[in-house]
Image (tube, grey):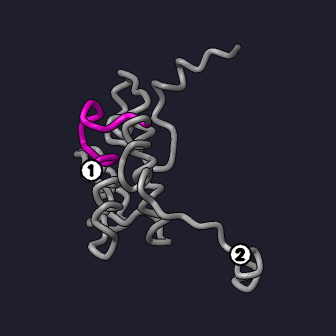
Amino acid sequence: MEDHSQSLKLGLGSPLWMAPEVAKLKRVGYGFPSDIWSLGCSVTEMSTRKHPQYINGENPLKLDRAIRSGKGPVVPDYLSDTLKDFINQCLQPHPNQRPTAADLLAHPFVNESSCTQPDLTELLFLF
């Protein structure tokens, strides 16, 4: 089995999805909470169909500063309250305040979603 412990101390990844503790590059390491942050960014991206948008825009220096200070991407008002709550919980600035994956599985956004299986013919017409 490979030892991946060293990779948990490197600041690798895409900045738009990077948790503040990863962006700070203090080499103190990070864990699963950083994945929860990235999940929040990914859910934002999927629900808006845009890369995570930050108030400071795409300026690399301002973006880096915003992420390091714990500012997450903008969560649009037009999303449902349940979805906004799910995303905001994932994007807590402090890692120890973020929910675990098990907590998120119990969140109403996941637990009470009314997903139906679409008819395959409907999907084919979309493409």
In the displayed structure, 78 sits above or below 15; it is below
* Residue at x-position 45% and y-position 39%: 35
Q: Which residue is mark 1?
A: 65
Q: How far across and how far down the image is residue 124, in percent?
A: 76, 80
Give the position of the N terminus as an image quadrant: top right
The span shown in magenta is 89-101
Specify the amino acid type for callout 2.
Answer: Asp
Give the position of the C terminus as an image quadrant: bottom right
| Marks 2/1: CA–CA distance | 45 Å
Task: For mark 1, give the secondary structure.
Answer: helix
Specify the amino acid type for callout 1.
Answer: Arg
Q: How far across and how far down the image is residue 13, in percent?
A: 51, 43
Q: Earlier in the sequence, mark 2 or mark 1?
A: 1
Q: How far across and how far down the image is residue 95, in percent?
A: 29, 34
**Do the numbered discs 2 and 1 sit on residues whose CB atoms are within 8 Å?**
no
Quadrant of the rendered structure where residue 119 is?
bottom right
Q: How far across and how far down the image is residue 40, in percent?
A: 40, 51
Magenta span contains residue 97: yes
Task: For mark 2, give the secondary structure.
Answer: loop
* Residue at x-position 75% and y-position 74%: 120
Q: Nearer the viewer, residue 99 or 7?
A: 99
Quadrant of the rendered structure where residue 16 is?
bottom left
Magenta span contains residue 66: no
Q: Nearer the viewer, residue 28 or 59?
A: 28
Q: Nearer the viewer, residue 96 or 108?
A: 108
Q: Which residue is mark 2?
A: 119
Q: Mark 2 against mark 1, which lies toward the viewer?
A: 2
* Residue at x-position 35% and y-position 61%: 83
